[in-house]
Amino acid sequence: MNTFESMVSTTTVDIRLFVLAMAEVALITLTTSASVHASLGGIETTIEADRLAIDATQRTQRTPRFTLHELQAPSGTTIREYVSPAGTVFGVAWQGPFMPDLRQLLGAHFDEYVAAMETSRIRRSPVLVQLPGFVLQSSGHMRAFAGSAYLPQALPPDVAAEEIR
Amino acid sequence: MTRSLLRALLAVSALTALLSLAACGGGGGSGGGSSSSPPAQNTQSITVDGGPANIPNFAFTSVTICAPGSSNCQTIDHIQVDTGSSGLRIIASVLSPGLSLPQLTEAGGNPLVECAQFVYGFSWGPVKLADIRIAGEQASSAPIQVIGDGSFPAIPRSCSNSGPPQDTVMSFGANGLLGVGLFAQDCGSTCAQTAIPGTYYSCPTSTCQPVQAALAMQLQNPVALFSADNNGVIIQLPSVPAAGAPTVTGSMIFGIGTQADNGLGGATVLPTDPNTGTIVTTYNGQTYTNSYVDSGSSLVFFGITAFPICIGSAQGFYCPTATQNLSATLQGTTQTSSHVGFSVANADQIFTANPSFNAFDDLAAPSGDTDTFAWGLSFFYGRSVYTAIEERNTPGGQGPYFAF
């Protein structure tokens, strides 16, 4: 903060820097508040909150049909988030030795997922939740988990659900 | 300072005791007992009867746990037999108040508490030490998890955010879980090297932090700790009729090729990936790279829309209009493969015909993806299924492998 103040006071040319710095502060505030909102169904910038939450490295791959953000957690679990050309995160997938923070990734849909499983006569086995607006599948065992979730209504018309993996 | 030093020393001595026991147990030896003593009684009865939550195709057994080195013991029934995990976990509410098990402390001297991640949810509870007795075998001073123990009520979000809680007998579907899988510990070297959120925690007070857990402090596959018959386990269940059966009784046999009753016979050995425990299944011209054999998964799980999904009481199961007789090929990391037949019946009709039945060899459900083919308990009926522990020698080579 001290560096910031001295920087602003030195020269008038630095006003541009000041504006940039303020924009940065705004961006940080945005990502911090975004950490309560999840990526699935959210805008592309919410992925940064997911990345920070798990201290992951990130790789981005842009294709005409969607943008893929791949987050690599230090634990070895990989998370892939799919963003539509309209800018919505329409799918997330995970694979690795440990389960990801699903509340972070699914947001409001996390509670739908938990509620859907309470009535089942299948336990400790692969999970498939198929609701009108939300689909989740999860399988594996300790040391090897994999799963995905997507929003059927947000799926771009030329993307198949099986591609989210 | 002095107190924490003392606690650290205690933890180290407990660790040393564990390590020496593990060394005694033979890490890759023949697994046989000493030549002078008679072989241990290595067979334990298992039952498929629905259990406390009326879940089809859960295999249960009884386990006796004792305060370490004492005759203060309790036998607990309806512990689910799980070849897909490692370690003994007990729901706190079924433990007798008189059975006082010592709390394990991590290297920093604080209580060690575990978040066990299952695909269906998480289980939170402290790691305590107990002697585990099954049939004539014993795992001495083994770390076990006491799920839902009231001493650590504040569950860290990094644990609870992985799914729904599995911390009561009803939500768990059993009084506990006996993990006799491919691995010697539940987490392994990753948790020994790094503090991983969602696994082991140090809980000095109410706030718990992820912590490294040395291999010997992690939950151990009890079989790996036995003094003999410690290289794996065989699950034997009889065949069941197409309509199912109300109750089925079979055997869990400890050791592979260590006694007259646990030879490999003509079983095909399928070595698994040493890190993930997976094999490959080929079905209907498609390859499923995330495939595994797991007594803790109740059905055969594959595909997304292979058959219609049930709309009646069997919600989530497959409901083909007529029973489908199918086949698949399972292959491990070698060229050896095994061709198996299996059936998928209409689960709605099966449940409606005999609402009190609990054991079925012809029920399946979607895995929900195109990579997973899980061979759960439906697959175990009418077979002897071998699960060999990592790095242990057997007549079929070193584990980890599945054989049947």
Image (spheres, coloured by chain):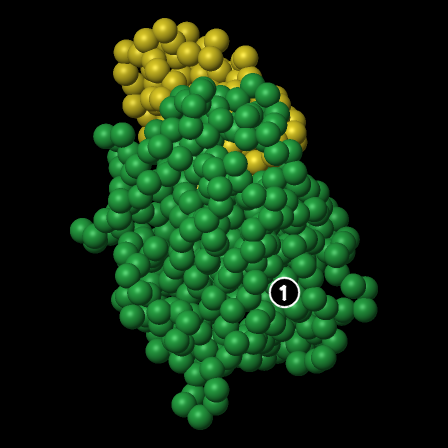
| Residue drawn at x 38%, y 29% as measured from the top left | B324
**Chain B color in figure:** green
**Disc 1 crowd, CA 10 A, few/some/many (<14, 14-19, 20+):** many
Tell which of B204 and B281 is nearer to you.
B281
Left or right? Give the position of B38 relative to B98.
left
Find residue A17 and report its horizontal and vertical position in percent: 44, 20
Q: Position of residue B226 (x, y in %)?
A: 50, 74
Q: Chain of mark 1?
A: B
**Closest to the observer: B309 or B358?**
B358
Direction from residue B156 to residue B35 in the image, left or right: left
Q: Can residue B1 be seen here?
A: no
* Position of the N terminus of chain A by quadrant: top right
Residue A82 is situated, as x and y percent measured from the top left of the image, at 39, 20
Q: Residue at x 31, y 43 (%)?
A: B340
Relative height, residue A146 to residue B71 (above, below): above
Q: The disc labelled 1 sits on which kind of residue?
A: Val
Write the residue at 57% across / 36% down: A122
* Quadrant for the C terminus of chain A in the image: top left
Would you place residue B53 above or below residue B260 in this image? above
Left-right relation of B389 to B179: left
Pick the residue in front: B139 or B145: B139
Which quadrant of the figure has residue B133? bottom right
Colour in which chain A is shown?
Answer: yellow
Residue that label 1 marks? B63
Q: Quadrant of residue B57?
A: top right
Q: Secondary structure at mark 1?
A: strand
Position of B325 relative to B185 (above/below): above
Q: Position of residue A51 (x, y in %)?
A: 46, 32
Question: Can you name the residue that lies furthest to the left here?
Answer: B335
Q: Residue at x 27, y 66 (%)?
A: B397
Q: Quick check: can you spot residue B135?
A: yes
